[in-house]
Amino acid sequence: MKLGCHVSMSSPLYLEGSVQEALSYGANALMIYTGPPQNTLRKPTNALHIEEMHELLQKNNIPLENVIVHAPYIINLANTIDLEKNKWSVEFLKQEIDRVASIGAKILVLHPGSHVKAGEEVGIAQIIKGLNEATQQDKGVRIALETMCGKGSELGYTFEQLSQIMKGVDHPELFGVCLDTCHIHDGGYDLSDFESILNDFDTLIGLNNLLVMHINDSKNVRGAKKDRHANIGLGEIGFELLNKIVHHPSLKEVVKILETPYIDGHAPYKAEIEMFQSETFKENLEDIVKAG
């Protein structure tokens, strides 16, 4: 399995420290932000210990393709209400693509955007326009549009919408999808019929374009459109379904990333990764995590 989790990137070791954190959880994949996801503060990439990160990955037989980068939440390519903010989003996305290329990673996960009450079709057209502007040059980075749950004016909560975006861009080969289990559950997809979900995805988007997955349980009932992640096996989706998804033979080569909540200030990832590796749910997961 290519299984990992979201890890921090902070001084003094930055990316080297990110890999160290992932290794401490028994992960062979990881997801990072190149800076705070809620603001524009960014360290120059030459200060991020990139070479040390590469050496540590190689030492532990982890391919660079297993390092996923997530774009900051403040990018909104669907905004037609404030065109200055939209223009800024496009420029900031260009910078993020450059940073990902400098790190050597290959996949940048991006929330498609919110139409800010302008309407879905208007928002989708604006996303396509922004993506085209941001990807005029191939930097060796593919953008994985994330499946969303549809809260507020979010776009990308159906495979049809993501397919529409990917068919509208000038260079579809530079794009793919990040499938989030919590998001599609909250968006109304029935994960108990995962084969049908995969078939629909393959028909509309193509399984070859499934670049990465976020594996999360959900605190909400199906279709709630609320986007509240739960720890593995402690939510409405449940361990059995998520375990089948993680071990699905068609998804063997897809990097899978946990984004589950901390438990009393403790990262749950080591215990959750072990559950998937052993294919056994730990009823006392919260106690195990709290005990460190």
Image (tube, rainbow, N blue to C red):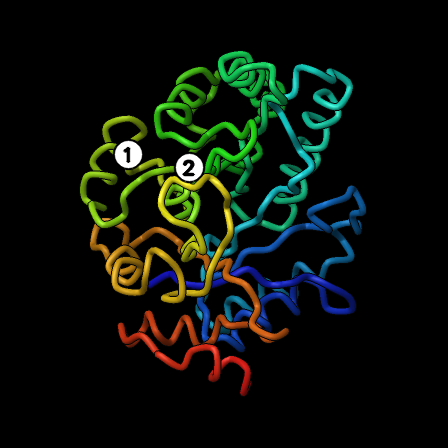
User: Residue, x 62% and y 65% (percent of image)?
Assistant: 18
Horizontal and vertical percent for residue 165? 45, 21
Label 1 is placed on what type of residue? Phe
Q: Is residue 75 left or right of residue 184?
A: right
Where, quadrant-wise, is the C terminus in this rendering?
bottom right
Q: Is residue 152 above or below residue 279?
A: above
User: Residue, x 42% and y 37% (percent of image)?
Assistant: 177
**Disc 2 to disc 1, how far (Cα)?**
10 Å
Rendering quarter of residue 173: top left
Give neighbour class at mark 1: few <14, some 14-19, many 20+ (Cα, 10 Å): many
Q: Which mark is residue 66?
A: none
Label 2 is placed on what type of residue? Val
User: Residue, x 40% and y 54% (percent of image)?
Assistant: 255
Mark 2 lies on residue: 177
Q: Which mark is residue 201?
A: 1
Q: Are marks 2 and 1 in contact (CB under 8 Å)?
A: yes
Q: Is residue 121 left or right of residue 51?
A: left
